[in-house]
Amino acid sequence: MAAVGLSHDGLVEMEEPTNTTPTPSRGVRVTATLLMIGLWGLVGALVLAIGLEWMLQAPRGDANPETTAKPRFQEIHSAYEPFTTKHLHPHYLFSMPFEAEARLAISNDYCHLTPDGFRASGPEEANGRKLAFFLGGSSAFGYYASADSTTITGYLNRMQDTYHFVNAGVPSWNSSQELFRLAHDLMAYQPDLVVAYDGVNDFTISHYYLRKALGHYPLGAPEGFDRLYALLGVVDEGQIRLPKPTWYERFFPKLTRRIRQRLGHRTPAASSVDVPTERLRPAAHQYVQNIRRMRDLVEAEGGRFMGIHQPATRLHQHIAEADTTHPVERAARAFYGYVLHDPQLDVEYLDFSNFFDRYFEAVPFYQRQGPDDLSDDIVFMDAVHLFDRGNRMIADSIRTYLAQPAFPPSTTQEERP
């Protein structure tokens, strides 16, 4: 407020008010501006994160051109997605659900599980035929087959009437898990024949752990053990000490997972580190030992055991997609060589690693990124899984082989045609 007073000559004087508020310095004004910009930036980032999380959690519908342009492939692909989930199991660490109700719940028109965890049919449906178990990972399971009847075991059960083949394959399993199932579960059925159709997962999983600098894991560690160990860590006196999720993991779980996947994909250790092939030799030998132990278990009960190295694009010559110069391709071939040249591989063992090179100058391989939908002439759906045509050819070759006289258990690999 202005001050009012009288001057000596009687005139009224008014004094201008004095501003007592200090003017902010330039530095303070700049700091405040930056703080406001930072605050609005944080608000914008938060809004963006909320939007991205909402988009990732929202159903995708049929907006993907691959979905609408390739209905047959997409329908089959979606049918097998429930079988990619790993469930904890008291014997095998990971498996499909061990509760009968949960097994039936994930079954669908393309793939059906019995309450005992077999695909399509169990031992009780042998109906007088000899009992045979077909062990392995997802390829033995018949991942991507258009029906239970078009898996390898499905074809075998129609092609011959000597054996009833029970599909005991489990996606992602290696030979160590197969060995445990044979000992803990399958031998109780007293099978006449056990076929182990495998080899690729033992290489893939062991090579993955070596690339991740986890070569100290015990040989035969299953797929996903690293993630389980990172999640659980230690069980102390019956109490599981779980790591507490960060605030962004709680509020933006899918966005956090997507960012980590992107960063991991660009990390050399996660994609392209060249593992010295010699480091795969122990894993190959462990695979051979598992095969031999399975053989010993089966033959001790009077049965017959047969191992088969499954086909893989990496081991074929007549597939354009196979890049023999890539470090992973070289490693796969080295592992395969270590297996076949292991002096202790004294089991009845069929090498189907490059099976389809015998029949095709160019093995039919499904191009997911191409314009065409899935057709009946396809053999390989991806690097290891077969479609119906491939399964039928493998089954027919097994049928032909089994029709020959059985080799004595003591016969060596070199003594067989």
Image (cartoon, rainbow, N blue to C red):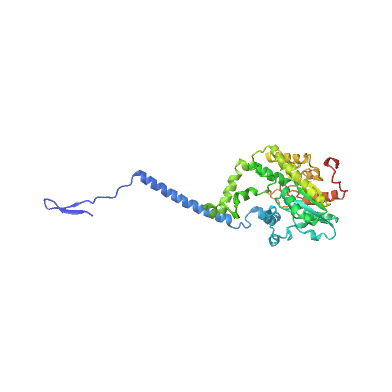
Q: Position of residue 23 (x, y in %)?
A: 31, 47
Q: Position of residue 242 (x, y in %)?
A: 57, 53
Q: Position of residue 194 (x, y in %)?
A: 80, 51
The mark tally for this picture is 0
- Is there any visible trace of residue 152 in the rendered image? no
70 to the left or right of 32: right
1 to the left or right of 344: left
Closer-to-camera residue (39/377): 39
Name, please, the residue furthest toward the left.
9
- Is there any visible trace of residue 40 in the rendered image? yes
In the displayed structure, would residue 155 be above or below residue 200? Answer: below
Q: Residue at the location (44% across, 50% down)? A: 39
In the displayed structure, would residue 164 be above or below residue 306? Answer: below
Name, please, the residue furthest toward the bottom.
101
Q: Position of residue 11 (x, y in %)?
A: 13, 53
402 to the left or right of 95: right
Q: Where, quadrant-wise, is the N terminus in this rendering?
A: bottom left
Q: Where, quadrant-wise, is the C terminus in this rendering?
A: top right
Q: Residue at the location (63% across, 50% down)? A: 228
Q: Residue at the location (58% across, 50% down)? A: 258
Name, please, the residue furthest toward the right.
405
